[in-house]
Image (spheres, helix red, strand yellow):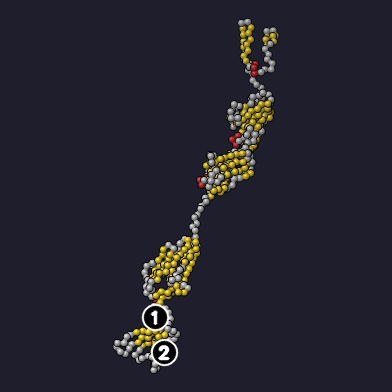
Amino acid sequence: MESDGNKRTLTISKCTLADDAAYECVIGNDKCFTEVFVKEPPVTITKLLDDYQVVVGEKVEFEIEVSEEGAHVIWCYEGEELSREDKSGRYRFRKDGKRHSLIIQEATLDDTGMYYVYTNGGQSKGELIVEEKELEILQSIADLTVKSAEQAMFKCEVSDEKVTGKWFKDGKEVQPNKRIKITHIGRMHRLTIDEVKPEDAGDYTFVPDGYALSLSAKLNFLEIKIDYVPRQEPPKIHLDVAGNMVSQNTIIVVAGNKLRLDVEISGEPAPTVTWTKADKVVAETEGRVRVESRPGLSSFVIEGAERDDEGNYNITVTNPAGEDKANLFIKIVDVPDPPEHVKCTGVGEDCATIIWEPPKFDGGAPIKALHRRTTALLPHTALYWGLYDSTVDSYVVKTKSVLIDRQLIGL
């Protein structure tokens, strides 16, 4: 304070904000007052904000320098003030002398935008561009084909061990349980499915968090089918006709008699049996000529054999394992027809010469005997047949001691 005559002076050197107040001057009963307003000197920004372009996960530090130490600054993002009391920990603020910093520890795509800093004497702005980090796939997931109750494991490896991700099946997020496990160790991500079931089959996808990419693979369920293959045995004909057979594969039947030929059949599965005569199938199950079937047995039956029944017969048995055949010749024997064109070509004193042509049907066997029938002259003489020659080898026969009234017939 200074006094000069009637003048009094109060001088405040190096005014600070604390000097901002009301002041009074009192002399006796008189007084007067005045008010002093103290403002901070304008703080200018001597180093402006820089723009930044980073990838997701990188650290960002905006920094300025001001003209006065301890100056108060305000940070804003897209027009909204950033508070130091933000509990999310997303932003950090630092003051070091004239340097002021805004730090984003791990940038995300949501941090992209314009940042501002204000002082009472200036402002600055800087743009932050956050791009997706290019993630390198070191090992992709592969398709799997597994059987029931086996384990399926999808695994992939990415370049950044901090990257997390999610697994999806047919578009729905996979939730872990006792049978399904999701693990992340370092750069390796695994999805393990124990005791695979048919409903586990589908398309599986791994999506890294924060990246516009996905890895997909298919799980195929291998269903094992056990087809029953029945036992197969080639068919076989067990032909046993020893009682009816006179030579190999030839059976003699007397006309009018019944022939029943039972043939045992084997094979697995049961074979199909076909009887044929001259390439004509004998399929009738009723009638005079028929085929009767029972398990393991096929019977060929002729009731009242006739001459037309004679011929070659074939039996064929087939199944998926093979085929078997047998050939038979059925011979019908009957009373031969009489000889044709019988003539007596000469009659001597005690003999006669007789010739004839063979009968159309010889009864199924060559003529081997010649019989004569004698009729006496007297009415009381008996009629009889007698064997004349059992070694006939010609159709010309001479007979001795023949009376005029006697007849010679070859049978």
Which quadrant of the structure image shows residue 91?
A: top right
Q: Secondary structure at mark 2?
A: strand
Give the labeled residue for mark 2: 398
Give me the residue at 68% from left, 7% from top: 6
Q: Nearer the viewer, residue 217 or 263?
A: 263
Identified by mark 2, the residue type is Lys
* Quadrant showing the C terminus: bottom left
Residue 328, relative to residue 42: is it above or below?
below
Q: Nearer the viewer, residue 6 or 357?
A: 357
Residue 332, relative to residue 53: is it above or below?
below
Of mark 2 and mark 1, the one earlier in the sequence is: 1
Q: Nearer the viewer, residue 371 or 31?
A: 371
Residue 258 x, y percent position in the rendering: 38, 71
Give me the residue at 59% from left, 47% from top: 142
Residue 279, relative to residue 129: is it above or below?
below
Q: Secondary structure at mark 1?
A: loop
Give me the residue at 39% from left, 94% from top: 349
Residue 394 x, y percent position in the rendering: 44, 86
| Residue 106 relative to residue 313: left or right | right
Q: Are marks 2 and 1 in contact (CB under 8 Å)?
A: no
Which quadrant of the structure image shows residue 121?
A: top right
Residue 238 x, y percent position in the rendering: 47, 66
Q: Is residue 179 visible?
A: yes
Q: How many marks?
A: 2
| Residue 179 relative to residue 380: left or right | right
Identified by mark 1, the residue type is Pro
Residue 154 x, y percent position in the rendering: 58, 44
Q: Residues within 10 Å of mark 2 (few under 14, many from 20)?
A: some
Query: Alpha-carbon distance for marks 2 and 1?
Result: 22 Å
Q: Which mark is residue 336?
A: 1
